[in-house]
Amino acid sequence: MAYAKIVVERDGPLAIVTLNDPLHMNAVDEIMRRDVVAAMNAALDDEGVRAILVTGAGEAFCAGANLRDMSGEYARGVTPDVGHMLRDGVIPLLVRMTEASKPIVAAVNGAAAGVGCGFALAADIVLVGRSGYFLQSFIRLGVVPDGGSSWLIPRLAGRGRAAAMMMLGEKIGAETAVAWGLAHRLFEDAELPSAARAMAMGLANGPTLAYGKLKHLLARSVDSSFAEQLELETACQQASFETADCREGVAAFIERRAPRFTGA
């Protein structure tokens, strides 16, 4: 499928989804919104794709919503239907990203602002370049965070940091983002694309079914009691031992070689 503002590349089991409107810092207008939702869902639906890498073209990951479109609606006396824009694809995609069995890596180059911040943080592993930063700029417009940020950031960075980040609307630079837990690792800008690709490819060649169960365990751990989590671990572990990947992993360990996982 051809996209107007997204570039999708396949490298074997890895899909690389690049937001591609660098002139506007990959801001989300209606075209970008539709393209991102369609491209990500296509990658998630494709059984040949075992991991996804998301990044942005140019000097930004995603600068958030394209406010020029909204300004035009206000000028015509129309209140933007943001609720529809979020519910029509964005929210289902963010939920699906967190629940999907496939690992998702975000490589944040430059700004990850507004809904772009939430999109990045919905990935399983977030990598950031030296010039990358996270910004909750909603308050500057007199509105509240969306894109899952009010759920994701408190759980990653803590409530106090989340409140300050959102109320003050300050940029959280790469080093601080790693220290807070918003990102896993910092790379120099020139190293980020190759490092992110290598990590995502490693995941794409890994035990896909086990990744899916691991994501499920992490999601449930937020609300489960210790006893409930132990039981869920046990059920997931039993199911994992029944997979071909587990048999391959055990054989590779005994034979002292690298495992060749197939995601089955």
Image (spheres, grey):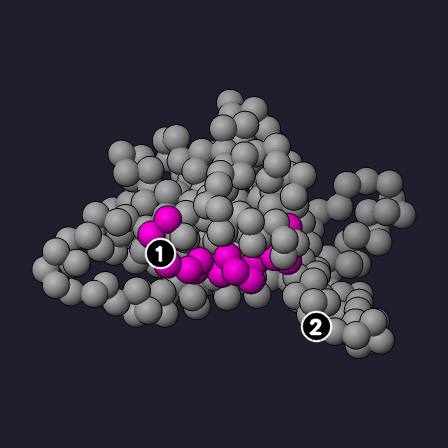
Q: Amino acid at mark 1?
A: Gly
Give me the residue at 63% from left, 57% from top.
159
Question: Is residue 153 within the magenta segment?
Answer: yes
Horizontal side of 109 relative to 231 (left or right) equals left
What is the CA distance from the residue labelled 2 to the residue labelled 1? Answer: 32 Å
- Which residue is identified by label 2? 223
- Which residue is identified by label 1? 142
Give me the residue at 66% from left, 61% from top.
215
Give me the residue at 89% from left, 48% from top.
254
Region rendered in magenta: 140-157
Horizontal side of 215 relative to 45 (left or right) equals right
Check the image and report above or below for 158 versus 198.
Answer: below
- Badge 2: residue crowd in 10 Å (few <14, some 14–19, many ≥20): few
SS type, badge 2: loop
For the residues labelled 2 and 1, say whether their Cβ atoms are less than 8 Å apart: no
Residue 207 shows up from this direction: yes
SS type, badge 1: loop
Quadrant placement of the C terminus: bottom right
**Residue 18 x/y as whole percent:** 40, 42
**Residue 113 x/y as whole percent:** 42, 45
Check the image and report above or below for 59 versus 125.
Answer: above
Q: Determine the residue located farthest toward the right in the rendered image.
A: 254
Check the image and report above or below for 246 versus 199.
Answer: below
**Residue 229 or residue 162, whichever sits in front:** 162
Question: Is residue 215 within the magenta segment?
Answer: no
Check the image and report above or below for 98 versus 20.
Answer: below
Give me the residue at 26% from left, 49% from top.
67
**Residue 250 x/y as whole percent:** 84, 54
- Badge 1: residue crowd in 10 Å (few <14, some 14–19, many ≥20): few
